[in-house]
């Protein structure tokens, strides 16, 4: 391998992408005493298509960076409650679970503001921000990495000891590290729009599931008492196929869902409906290579179940900076030293992400939508009656409670018991209503079963791919479950 001359270093670390992951990583490294260049192909402030919801873990990370005591940050909308609607009907409304050491609320912070505040703090701390500057390629040497960029039509290169890729869902750094783009299976597509002059509940984040759009879901995250960020997201690779036009789906929901129609009323769309991909966690994708480390969306750190990525961007930024600081201190620049970061990601978020991936793999099969929506109704019914269950279920959905809680005997037991109770109740109701209702119930059940058998025959390849995916996800998840069980037995 070739060497770069030691006098050639432009900085200790070059970070590509000044979103939450890149700017936070830069801030942590500079605070620890290292030279950092942060580049982005966009000038700041810049917008980023997002639901803008920052949960309690994200807020806690932002508190460390410091600007959250500013008046402008305090003007952003506080979220204390979450509500779930199924086909226009309210299913459940609960406070955001309060977890020790975490704020009891989230916030909806427009990314135009949030990302710029983090960048400003990084620059204040001493980070060299260079924009607009795009990373195109890099070459790894024995003692450093040279990054080739384009700035104002000119080629420019930076020589650093490490390169940190924080360049988002369509990351150039991750593509080079992995030798390919992320698999379509790991991509969620989502659109978002801002609405003004509406009648929303300012402290309540809302999720909408409808049979028409499942496995996608809609969100309404208020940016204030009369305005909101509204969007819809869906896994790209689901079946059976069918052109899904997300902007149209969003407009359709706004026009047809009774609850949402009431809220939006005479409100108007501000700006355009914009789409963006989310690349979710793939445990087989590389997040480190010689002299290179990936953070945030570039590392696929988005929870496929709820689309949350800001908190993981901020957490991974801190963990990556801690790992790099350790490399500098130990004078160890090897891939082996970077493996500590990979291990940290697996330990801290791997279980949660694997469980989310498993759920998503199940619901990719849209033939089974009635089953999934019934399951959702069962879980929310249980949550409406059982505070402890609600804290675990809501906490997992909000990324606050470790996923392993859902794999506990008590949680599974309660879910199964609720399933049995709901099924028995609806069967008894049919029986009480007499033979016509019993026949209708039987026809519906037979129709569903026949539909599944015929779908299985007609879509053999898709079913096989789906089952293989389930087995793969199950294998990954079982490794975490086994580790957890061993730990519990040891304790
Ligand atoms: C529609 C939608 C809704 C979402 N809603 C939420 C939500 O409500 N809450 C939540 O927590 N998460 C949400 N997410 C996910 C969240 O947006 C991301 O997880 C988060 O932005 C990740 O931050 P990041 O810094 O890793 O990447 P980004 O914020 O994407 O920043 C990457 C930066 O890299 C720059 N860049 C890209 N390529 C290059 C290059 N080659 N050279 C230089 N610079 C480059 C880009 O200009 C960009 O500024 C949503 C995502 C979408 C698409």
Image (spheres, rainbow, N blue to C red):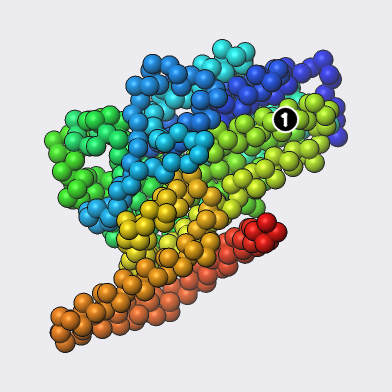
| Side (left or right) of 143 relative to 448 | right
| Residue at the far front in the pictured view | 491
Q: Residue at x 55, y 56 (%)?
A: 404
Dot 1 falls on a residue whose secondary structure is helix
Residue picked out by circle 1: 324
Which quadrant holds the C terminus?
Answer: bottom right
Give whichever of 277, 426 is nearer the camera: 426
Q: Residue at x 73, y 27 (%)?
A: 325
| Side (left or right) of 442 relative to 454 | left
Percent x, y for residue 33?
71, 17
The quadrant in which residue 427 appears is bottom left
Q: Is residue 137 visible?
A: no
Which quadrant holds the N terminus?
Answer: top right
Q: Residue at x 14, y 39 (%)?
A: 265
Q: Residues within 10 Å of mark 1 (few under 14, many from 20)?
A: many
Percent x, y for residue 24?
57, 26
For residue 407, above or below residue 58: below
Percent x, y for residue 284?
65, 53
Q: Residue at x 35, y 80 (%)?
A: 449
The quadrant in which residue 191 appears is top left
């Amino acid at each position: 391998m070739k060497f770069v001359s030691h006098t050639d270093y432009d900085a200790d670390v070059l970070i590509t992408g000044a979103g939450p992951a890149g700017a936070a990583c830069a801030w942590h490294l500079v605070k620890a005493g290292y030279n950092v260049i942060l580049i982005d192909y966009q000038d700041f402030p810049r917008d980023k298509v997002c639901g803008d919801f920052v949960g309690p873990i994200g807020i806690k990370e932002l508190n460390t960076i410091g600007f959250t005591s500013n008046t402008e940050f305090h003007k952003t909308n506080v979220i204390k409650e979450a509500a779930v609607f199924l086909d226009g009907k309210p299913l459940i409304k609960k406070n955001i679970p309060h977890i020790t050491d975490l704020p009891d609320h989230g916030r909806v912070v427009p990314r135009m503001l949030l990302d710029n505040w983090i960048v400003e703090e990084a620059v204040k701390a001493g980070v060299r921000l260079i924009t607009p500057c795009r990373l195109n390629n890099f070459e790894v040497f024995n003692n450093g990495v040279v990054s080739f960029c384009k700035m104002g039509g000119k080629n420019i290169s930076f020589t650093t000891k490490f390169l940190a890729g924080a360049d988002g869902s369509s990351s150039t750094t991750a593509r080079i590290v992995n030798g390919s783009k992320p698999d379509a299976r790991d991509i969620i597509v989502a659109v978002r729009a801002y609405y003004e002059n509406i009648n929303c509940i300012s402290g309540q984040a809302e999720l909408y599931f409808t049979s028409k759009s499942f496995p996608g879901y809609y969100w309404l995250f208020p940016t204030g008492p009369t305005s909101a960020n509204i969007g819809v997201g869906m896994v790209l690779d689901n079946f059976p196929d069918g052109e899904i036009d997300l902007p149209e789906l969003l407009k359709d929901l706004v026009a047809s869902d009774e609850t949402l129609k009431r809220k939006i009323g005479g409100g108007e769309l501000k700006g355009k409906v914009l789409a963006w991909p989310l690349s979710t966690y793939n445990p087989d994708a590389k997040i480190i290579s010689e002299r290179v480390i990936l953070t945030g969306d570039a590392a696929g750190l988005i929870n496929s179940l709820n689309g949350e990525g800001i908190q993981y961007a901020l957490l991974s930024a801190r963990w990556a900076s801690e790992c790099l600081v350790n490399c500098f201190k130990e004078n160890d620049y090897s891939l082996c030293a970077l493996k500590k970061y990979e291990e940290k990601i697996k330990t801290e978020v791997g279980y949660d992400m694997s469980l989310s991936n498993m759920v998503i793999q199940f619901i990719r099969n849209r033939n089974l939508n009635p089953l999934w929506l019934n399951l959702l109704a069962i879980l929310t019914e249980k949550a409406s009656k059982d505070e402890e269950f609600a804290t675990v279920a809501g906490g997992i959905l909000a990324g606050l409670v470790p996923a392993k809680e859902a794999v506990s005997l008590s949680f599974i037991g309660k879910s199964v018991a609720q399933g049995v109770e709901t099924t028995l109740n609806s069967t008894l109701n049919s029986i009480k209503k007499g033979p016509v209702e019993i026949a209708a119930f039987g026809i519906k059940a037979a129709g569903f079963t026949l539909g599944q058998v015929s779908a299985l025959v007609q879509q053999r390849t898709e079913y096989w791919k789906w089952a293989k995916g389930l087995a793969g996800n199950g294998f990954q998840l079982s490794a975490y479950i086994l580790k957890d069980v061993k730990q519990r037995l040891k304790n």
